[in-house]
Each structure stands twice: as structure tokens, then as C-alpha cells.
Amino acid sequence: MTDRRVSAPHLVRLLGPVDPNIPAYQWISDSIRLLIADGRLLHDTRLPSERDLVTALALSRTTVTHAYAILRDKGYAQSRQGSGTVVRVPGGPASGGGEPLPLASLDDGSGDVIDLTHASPMAVPGLSVAYAEAVDRLPAFVGGGGYFHLGVPQLREQIASGYRARGVPTDAEQIIVTVGALGGLAAVFRALVRPGDRVIAQSPGYPNSLGALSHSGARVVPVTDDGAGIEQLLDTIHRSGARAMLAMPDFHNPTGVVWSEDERARVAAAWRERGVIGIVDDTTARVWLDAEPQVRPMAAHSADCVSVGSASKSHWGGLRIGWIRAPHNVIGAIARARLSLDLGAPILEQLVVAQLLRESDGLADSVRRQLIASREALLELATACPGWRTRVPEGGLSLWWQLPQPKSSALVTAARRHGILLAPGSAFAVTGHGLERWVRTPYGLDDVTLRRAVPIIAQAWAEAKTGR
């Protein structure tokens, strides 16, 4: 069992200001319940003792005791001998739910394992409240058939507003709401890429995007983009005869590389000169951790590029809402192609995302702090596994480790025996093989869990090196 606890001062900060309109015990119990519902207090987290919380809140012992009793009665807490009061998720937390990758194993991460195959954060604070408010707005949409194949107007305008705020003139007519970013990319590929067309793709890259590109019938042209500069990329654009390029210029998955303003301008100029359609994966553009990059979106440099975004990396993967931003002259073709894939995203989730984007188009501060702590936890692998090297990204959701030996697949196999799921470097190769000197470790899980994973990964690496 993980020894996860929350101190009284930290819980007070999470609770926020007192609600004067309800009894104090109800405010405490309701607030803790919402923290559990939002995933900010995890299953089995030890709550502060009643005495410590009384002191931190400057309330009576009776008030705190009553609040904890309500939580226990409703199944959100449990008293344990020697452990005090611990958080419970009614019915227990659902296992699995990680971002699926096209790996040889179909293991969904359920059971007693630590799943490091998916790079996605925990849910944004306030998610439960956003759903409740969306339900209140839902009656306005139930009078018709419910098919908003381009997206509900409120969300399309909110997404367009976000692009305008970042220096890209955009109106709602340029936005299509999709079922996740992958659904958006599939529609773009279907509309703009013909079977046999050459399409440049960065290697390593995101496996699911590369899979969608391959399924489109494109001839994928890999180009190494490891943060050492874009000269090879520019040369490939000029020499390959490619029709399009799939690019991820912001906190690239898995490398974490961010293109500078100058690099963006040079790539956009090469696209224009060679008639290459830029297809830009914007999914991690707002997932900065240390400082917001002073760069504009690729669409500010290339008016003809198509951008695909999502709420999955910035808010929560379970929302399954993505979007396409495209020039007016191609948005119609993409919309028609999309209808051959699906007929629209769920209305309720669209209303939830519209509300969340109104509050923030990127990570919540509490999520950012958690990701920074989790990144620090996984950086301990540099000490636990001598010879491992990584560039510390200032954002994104994973570390991309270079191994001293080409043993990535062996490491994955050994780690699985010890209850750790990892994806081998080959999963991120455009060709589907190679990159045996690389492994990705996402830091979307909490830092307590990841610190527990570090020595286990180190043990698996020792076994992989010796062939055991």
C-alpha cells in the first residue's frame, strides 16, 4: 500500500475559502468529497488527524469530527487502526484507463501494476463542478437530434478565441470539434493526403498519430528531430517531394523539444516554398511547467497549415474532445471527410470543455505543481540507473531517456515482470523498429507512485543488461 498522506496546512489550502452559507462541518465534508471526485485527494491518502485539522482551521473538535463522520458514512473515508482516517473512493478506484498505445501487448494497465505507457495528467480540479454546470445547460440542446457535427457553437468560439489570444486570427467557422485529437488527425489525413503521397514525420513520434498516418495510405518519410537543430528537417522538406508534414513543435512527444520562433519561421518558409501542407499537432502546446515559452503557434507563421488540438493533455483524457483549426479554403473538405469517420462529439463533454477553457486554456496551477514534482521523482532514474541520460523538458508529460546499451525492449520485458508497464523506444519509431537505446517515462502519475517505481525500474534495468 502506498504511504500517501496530506498535511493539515496543505489540506486547508486545497479546501479554499470557507462557505459562510452552510455549516462549517458541511463545508469541510463537501469540499473534501469534491477533492476526491476531482482526483486531487487519491484513494488511500491519509487525511490529517482531527487534532491537526482543528488547529489548522481554527474550528472546534466537534466540527471536524462531524465532518469526518459524514465522509465515513457516505463512503469517502475510512478509519484504520494506527493509520487514522484515509480517503476512500466509493466502490474503489477503477483500474486501467491509461492512454492506449499500439504495443504488442494489449495490457490495459489494470491490476496491480504501475502503468508508465501513457503520458496524460490527472483530471483538472473542478471537473465534477464543470460537469454539473454542463448538465444544467444541456436542456438547451435536447430539442433537436443532437448531431452538432462541427461542434456546439459555444465551444467552437471558445477555441477560436484561444487561437486569437495567442496571435492567430481565427473565427469559429475555422474550427471543427472532434472526438479527441486522433480523430481530428484522421479526418485531416483523409481530406488532404492521397494514398501514396509522401508525408514527412518526425522520428521519434507519437505512435497513435504515426499509425493514423500510415493507415491513410501515405508513404511516411521519417526525419530525425532530436533537438540538435532543424537543418536535416529543412533538407528533407526541400528534397523529399513531400505533399505534407506532420509536425509537433511544442513539447514534442516524446522528446520534449520546443521549436524556437526562428525555427518555426524557417520551417513555415520551407513549407511555402515547396508547397508542403503543414499538419500541426498542438496537443501539448499549453502543457508548460517551468515557464511559458515565448513562441507563437505555427499557424502564426504558416497561414495555410492545419492545426489539431485537444483537451486531453491540458485538462483530462477522459473528456475525449479535440479540435481542428484550418484555413477557410480547406475546412469544408475536412468537415466532409470527417463525416466518414464519425458524426460528432458528445454534447455534454463539449459543454464541459467550453467551461474549462473559459477558466484556463492550459494546466491548472495545482496540476502543474504535481507534474513538476512527478518529473523530479522520475529524474532520480539518472542516479538509480548509471549511464541513463535525458534532456529535462520545461513542459510536456514525459522524459525521453537515452540508454547506455540498446536494451529498451529487454527493459520493458523485465519491468513487466516486476509490475511496471513501459513502452519501448521502437514504439515511437516511424518505421516501427529501432530506437533500442531509448525509453520514455511519462510523469502523469503522482510523485509518490513514481518514486516507488524508480528502484523497481532500476532493478529491471540491471536484469535487462545481464540478459536475465
Image: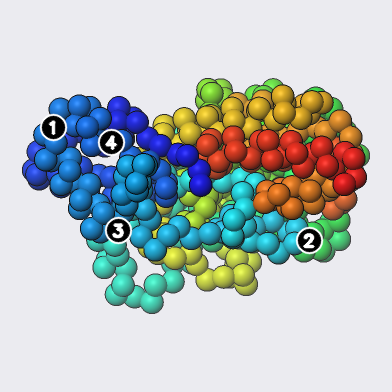
At a point 37% along the width and 53% down the height, the residue shown is 88
Residue 290: where, in percent of width, then height?
54, 23
Specify which label sits upstream in the sequence, 1 or 2. 1
Q: Amino acid at mark 3?
A: Gly
- Pointer 2 residue: 104
Residues at discs 1 and 4 in contact (Cβ within 8 Å): no
- Pointer 4 residue: 49
- Pointer 1 residue: 59
Q: Nearer the viewer, mark 2 or mark 3?
A: 3
Q: Residues within 10 Å of mark 3 (few under 14, many from 20)?
A: some
Residues at discs 3 and 4 in contact (Cβ within 8 Å): no
Residues at discs 2 and 3 in contact (Cβ within 8 Å): no
Residue 40's image quarter? top left
Q: Viewed as shown, does residue 393 lie left or right of 21?
A: right
Specify which label sits upstream in the sequence, 2 or 4. 4
What label does residue 75 carry, if any? 3
